[in-house]
Image (cartoon, coloured by chain):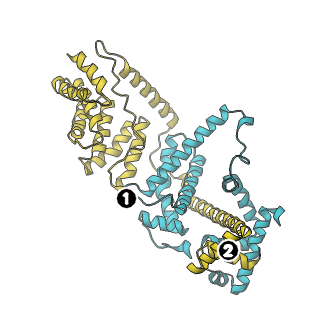
Chain colours: A yellow, B cyan
Amino acid sequence: MDQTQQERIEAYLMGRITEQDWQAFEAKMTADPHLLEAVKNHRQFMQAIEETAFREMIQDIHQEGNFDTRRSIPLYTNRRLLGIAAAILLVMGSIWLFVPKQNKPSLDPYRSFEPDPGLPTILGPTQELDFWEGMNAYKLGEFEEANRLWEPLLKNDPRNDTLLYYLGQLAFVQRQNELAARRLEQVYQQESSVFHEKASWYLAVAKLRIRETPDAKILLEKIAAKAGEFQDEAKALLELID
Amino acid sequence: MSTILFANKTSFTDQELLEGLLANSRAATEFLYQQCYPKVAAQLRRMGAGQEDIRDMFQEGMVVLWKNARKGAYQVQTNTRMSTYLVQVCKWQWSDRLKQARTKKEIPLQQQDDPKTSSSFLDQWMKKEELDRFRSLFAQLGERCQDMLRRFYFQKESMRDIAAAFSITDATARTEKYRCMQRLKQKFNPQES
């Protein structure tokens, strides 16, 4: 490839030609497979130079910013140990939760506990990051961290059903049943919420736990009356209550 | 002079960051880096990543975002910030690396795909191993050639600006840039020269 041809190819690839010249070049490429190949090859080199330079730039930024010595959040002295402890606590907690209690049914009200990572939210852009960080903490069983991140968001947006639902779940899994019931009740009242159905089920279970059995029964009857994710379990629970 | 775009800005909207990435603006890239690195580091540390892993994952995540912005695969969204997108990309990459590490342990070496034959030339060529080779060949060009090619292809400077920076004529700058590119191609594909 000579200098003139290279410059023409670059002008085409970098959009530094007129519309008319661009069309003429396209037509020439269609008719000349060698030119087409040369353009493809040159584009690859241009992309590789750009990527190389971009990588160099972020490497420079990293070195100049001393990022390796920074810590963004207070770091515990032994995260591995804490992770193991958290895992053990989670396993023990799960076992305890799943053990059937006397005449209670072997229900699994926690089976939908794991949140959907692709959850659509209606949060504003400035709050998204904290929400997802909280979600990540929640999935890792770091409930206090999730709570710490989500509570301020709820203060700013007290009727947000996504936050109310997951903060309700947080309370639910931590056996703070009254708080769970309060939050889930607010989601349940929002009939258009995507969490309405789930909230009604967990609200019913939370109400049973705090011995508000008549309210729980009304909720369970509604759940059992129509096809849904929790219909069978609601029916089974109703039979036991009766 | 696109890399000096937004040079004096201290805060960016996502739209400005996207424009900055497309223009290879150092200021915009640096802002994004400073904003997101600590968040990614905190998340990946929780997922068991060490300091070097975090740096690698973050920089790969930045490259993914940069490439996706160019392809149009990343666009500014009203309900998801660019920083959230970047954090997620880094987390997925780390999860993938963990998965790959597990898979490699399970699959005998001879049964693993040969990366040289399992994908198209372009894909393969752009893979990191090839890019590493490209980078080492690029580094062999000498400072002057590297600088000239960077200015033209990355910083999108005009040949007139490049000529002025090197105190040479436009015609000499164009010839020099052409020769630098030819040398790079010959180094990369010696059989074609």
- Using the image as rendered, state which of residue A122 and residue B57 is in the foreground: A122
On-image quarter of the N terminus of chain B: bottom right
Instruction: Determine the residue positioned at 50% across, 54% down.
Output: B37
* Vertical order, A206 against B181 (above or below): above
Image x and y of residue B193, in percent: 83, 67
Residue most extreme to the front: A31
Identify the disc placed on residue A28: 2
Residue reaching furthest to the bottom:
B169
Q: Secondary structure at mark 2?
A: helix
Identity of the residue drawn at 34% across and 41% down: A147
Residue B157 makes an appearance in the image: no
Question: How packed is label 2: few (under 14 Cα within 10 Å), some, or many (20 or more)?
Answer: few
Q: Are marks 1 and 2 in contact (CB under 8 Å)?
A: no
Q: CA distance from mark 1 to mark 2?
A: 42 Å
The three-letter amino acid code for the residue at tag 1 is Thr
Q: Quadrant of residue A14?
A: bottom right
For marks 1 and 2, give the one nearer the viewer. 2
Asked which quadrant contains residue A63, the reply is bottom right
Place of residue A58 in the rendered image (x, y in percent of width and height, measured from the top left)? 58, 61
Q: Is residue A230 visible?
A: yes
Check disc 2 and give the amino acid type. Lys
Residue at horizontal 73%, vertical 48%? B116
Q: Which mark is residue B78?
A: 1
